[in-house]
């Protein structure tokens, strides 16, 4: 580790750095030169962050222009400093730039405007501002704006007040307090960046701290989830893949837990905050500790620790899953999916009905215990209904072949049985996610499906190979992925089987 904190590179201070593919150049050097002209200097980690944020592919487009940039960084680390300087410099380098700086709260947006307005008044910066009655700084009738001599402008506003709607040809959008970001706000604002006139494309920057359980933080969580799926289980700080940038600084996952570091451990604070203590003094940390209402708030906002590291995360949002629930199952051709856990201690059976407007899934049973104890009963049940079934799809090395043989012994033809390959399994998982998003999949909304609902609530995607294929993973110690896996396998069978039974099947 470097002795001088300001010389520590990004790879040394961050917990996760997921870099988009194909970066060959960066606009950061121009930005850094402009900021140096204004008297700014950056720590090494900030320099790395800037290079990646403004990285260019061979076609001259920002490597992040499609997927955007996400910073999960605690308070008092100078997020506003680095991003503010970046947006300010880009506005002077590229004429007619339009940048929107949004926060959830009006107070946050106003404070950011005031900070950047004070910066704009510096003698070295002021010549770049527009020459008008307000000297380039406008704050009237709730409108806050910095105007530049070259026609660029930065506008500030709060999403809770509806700011961001109605703009077009926006080049930069900054989503401050991104842990409180609704899908509606994204729908209102993101399309404007598609019309960016910047030669490198539009730029979306999401920055915030880990969301509280009560926050509408699904959009921010999803961005982190996608990045960590690319990172996989390698344990490396830096990973490359996809079309977005994700940077997270945070304390160790066991901080504040029995046997782990204490909440006020200075080493943990330094891990979460690369600006501490050389730029963020101890007194600032003490003030924040005094004013945050709880240890949970301290963990999230000062130490950057995500709740889902211990409490679980989900790929399918609760609201979306609920929206796909129906009270009555439609009729259709049945397929079944059976998923065994890796160790053989759990097995789930689900059914899927293919009907004229989509697919309907239900969990039929889920059991825990030695695999050999449940195979016979499971095989008996499936053998009773195979004639009315398109296909039975089985996955899980711990029991798939045993169940296949048990079905054959009971007279079930091989043509009705399909043992899923790894590729079949990952396709089934992705197929389920797309069907839920697209509205072509329904599930039974009843107490009898509680086990499936609980599985969906704690299952997230886990990368399985370098190509990006993924499977379901339970993210809590007592979570079970086999219910949602069995549903995915049943859906896969319905989508891919060409077999048509002699009559319509009854699912249950």
Image (tube, helix red, strand yellow):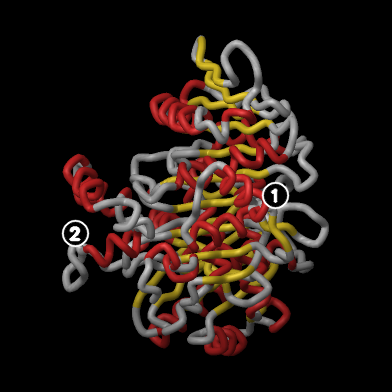
Q: Position of residue 321 (x, y in %)?
A: 51, 47
Q: Position of residue 495 (x, y in %)?
A: 72, 62
Residue appearing at x 69%, y 29% in the figure = 152
> Mark 1 = which residue?
65
Of the numbered discs 1 and 2, the one sitting upstream in the chain is: 1
In the rendered view, would you say 2 is above or below 400? above
Decide if residue 451 is in sight here: no
Q: Position of residue 349 (x, y in %)?
A: 50, 68
Q: What residue occupies the far front of the structure in this picture?
A: 123
State left or right for residue 311 relative to residue 421: left
State left or right for residue 364 relative to residue 286: right
Is 506 or 104 nearer to us in this picture?
104
Q: Quadrant of the N terminus?
A: bottom left
Q: Disc 1, disc 2: CB below 8 Å?
A: no
Residue appearing at x 48%, y 68% in the figure = 9
Q: Secondary structure at mark 2?
A: loop
Decide if residue 286 is in sight here: yes
Q: What residue occupies the far right of the structure in this picture?
A: 59
Is 175 or 481 nearer to us in this picture?
175
Residue appearing at x 53%, y 71% in the figure = 238
Q: Residues within 10 Å of mark 1 (few under 14, many from 20)?
A: many
Residue appearing at x 20%, y 40% in the figure = 291
Is 294 or 82 nearer to us in this picture?
82
> Mark 2 = which residue?
264
């Amino acid at each position: 580790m470097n002795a001088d904190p300001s010389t520590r590179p990004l790879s040394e201070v961050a917990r996760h750095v997921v870099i988009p593919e194909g970066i060959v150049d960066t606009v950061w050097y121009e930005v850094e030169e402009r900021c140096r002209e204004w008297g700014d200097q950056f720590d090494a980690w900030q320099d790395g962050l800037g290079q990646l944020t403004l990285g260019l592919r061979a076609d001259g487009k920002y490597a992040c222009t499609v997927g955007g940039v996400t910073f999960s960084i605690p308070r008092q680390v100078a997020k506003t400093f680095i991003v503010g300087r970046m947006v300010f410099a880009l506005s002077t380098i590229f004429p007619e730039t339009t940048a929107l700086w949004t926060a959830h709260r009006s107070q946050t947006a106003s404070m950011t405007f005031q900070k950047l307005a004070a910066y704009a008044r510096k003698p070295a910066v002021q010549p770049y501002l527009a020459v008008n009655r307000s000297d380039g700084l406008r704050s009237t009738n709730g409108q806050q704006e910095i105007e530049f001599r070259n026609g660029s402008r930065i506008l500030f506003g709060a999403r809770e007040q509806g700011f961001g709607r109605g703009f077009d040809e926006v080049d930069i959008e900054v989503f401050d307090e991104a842990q409180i970001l609704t899908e509606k706000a994204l729908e209102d604002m993101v399309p404007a960046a598609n019309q960016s006139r910047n030669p490198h494309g539009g730029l979306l920057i999401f920055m915030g701290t880990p969301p509280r359980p009560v926050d509408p933080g699904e959009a921010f969580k999803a961005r982190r989830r996608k990045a960590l799926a690319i990172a996989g289980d390698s344990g490396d700080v830096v990973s490359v893949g996809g079309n977005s940038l994700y940077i997270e600084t945070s304390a160790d996952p066991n901080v504040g837990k029995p046997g782990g570091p204490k909440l006020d451990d200075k080493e943990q604070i330094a891990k979460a905050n690369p600006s501490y203590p050389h730029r963020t003094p101890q007194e600032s940390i003490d003030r924040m500790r005094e004013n945050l209402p709880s240890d949970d708030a301290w963990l999230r906002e000062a130490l950057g620790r995500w709740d889902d590291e211990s409490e679980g995360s989900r790929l399918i949002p609760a609201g979306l899953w609920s929206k796909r629930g129906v009270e009555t199952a439609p009729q259709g051709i049945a397929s079944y999916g059976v998923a065994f856990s890796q160790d053989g201690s759990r097995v789930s059976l689900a059914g899927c009905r293919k009907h004229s407007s989509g697919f309907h899934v239900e969990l039929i049973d889920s059991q825990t215990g030695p695999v050999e104890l449940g195979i016979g009963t499971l095989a008996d049940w499936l053998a009773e209904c195979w004639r009315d079934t398109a296909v039975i799809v089985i996955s899980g090395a711990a029991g798939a072949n045993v169940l296949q043989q048990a079905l054959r012994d009971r007279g079930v033809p091989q043509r009705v049985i399909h043992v899923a390959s790894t590729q079949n399994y990952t396709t089934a998982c992705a197929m389920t996610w797309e069907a839920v998003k697209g509205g072509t999949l329904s599930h039974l909304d009843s107490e009898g499906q509680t086990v499936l609902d609980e599985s969906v609530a704690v299952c997230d995607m886990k990368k399985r190979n370098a190509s990006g294929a993924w499977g379901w993973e339970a993210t809590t110690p007592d979570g079970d992925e086999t219910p949602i896996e069995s549903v995915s396998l049943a859906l896969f069978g319905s989508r891919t089987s060409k077999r048509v039974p002699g009559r319509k099947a009854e699912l249950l």
